Amino acid sequence: MQLDTLYTVNTPEGIALTLTPAGFVPRFMAWFIDLLIRFSVGIVLITILGILGYLGDGLILIFLFLLEWWYPVWFEWRHQGQTPGKRLLELYTVQRDGSPVTFAASLLRNLIRFVDFMPFFYGFGVISLLFTRHFQRLGDLAADTLVVYKPHLNAHRALPAVEPLPLPQPLLIQEQQTLLQFAERSRTLTPARADELAQITAETLTQGQPASLTLQRYAVWIAGQHMLSPQQVASS
């Protein structure tokens, strides 16, 4: 059972790490902020170094090259996957397994921006981002990275205060985890959006009852009964 665009990574320690990939709009806003920063720094450099004549022109070209190609790599590598723009939008870049982005991966994903930029203003990059499941541009696919929202620890983790309802049928651990994640996240969703997501399971679980509320009650029951193992599910 899969709800929404959440991405779950099972760490070697057996912990299910849930990440939320960022879509086109927040990534564009972060990129635009970084562009304004680079543009502002570039104007200052040109103004200051321009008075040095030919030597200044050479230095300007070097600094502009570094500013364009090393700005995102240095910030992602040294600041936990965040450029200033990503920090303001609370985004960060990670490896696909949830680990911090490496220098090599950051370098590769940013060098391939040249391909993402073609054939017109980020044409391939936008198409790739819109049509991949976890909103990855070509650079992300090549470097095996994701841009995700920064998690807020201990935020919205409590289950809704509703009456527990026993499951009508056994569910696998992954399915039970999905119900718990939905119940935790439903506090951040509008009622209409929560119902829209809950309707995905309407035929198999809710049996004609109000979908969102029913799934929340199942989740509270699971939390109180502890999740069943695959062996328990098979024997139920």
Image: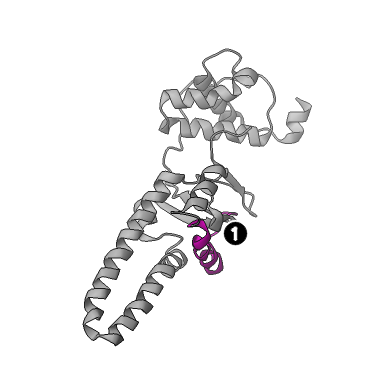
The one of 220 and 133 positioned closer to us in this rendering: 133
Secondary element at image label 1? helix
For the record, the magenta segment spans: 95-117
Can you tell which quarter of the image residue 86 is in? Answer: bottom left
Q: Label 1 belongs to which residue?
A: 142
Q: Nearer the viewer, residue 193 or 32?
A: 32
| Residue 95 shows in the view | no
User: In the rendered view of the protein, which quadrant contains the N terminus?
Assistant: top right
Q: Is residue 136 left or right of residue 72?
A: right
Q: Amino acid at mark 1?
A: Ala
Q: Residue at x 53, y 62 (%)?
A: 112
Of 212 and 70, which appears nearest the observer?
A: 70
* Position of residue 232 in the picture relative to residue 50 (left or right): right
Q: Residue at x 48, y 34 (%)?
A: 184
Residue 28 x %, y % = 40, 50
Residue 59 seen in the current view: yes
At a point 46% along the width and 38% down the height, the residue shown is 157
Residue 232 drawn in magenta:
no
**Where in the figure is residue 60, as x and y percent of width and height?**
32, 78
Q: Position of residue 203 (x, y in %)?
A: 63, 18
Q: Quarter of the image holding residue 41?
A: bottom left
Decide: few, some or many residues near mark 1? Use Cα within 10 Å; few <14, some 14-19, many ≥20: few
| 48 up-or-down from 193: above or below | below
| Direction top: furthest residue | 208
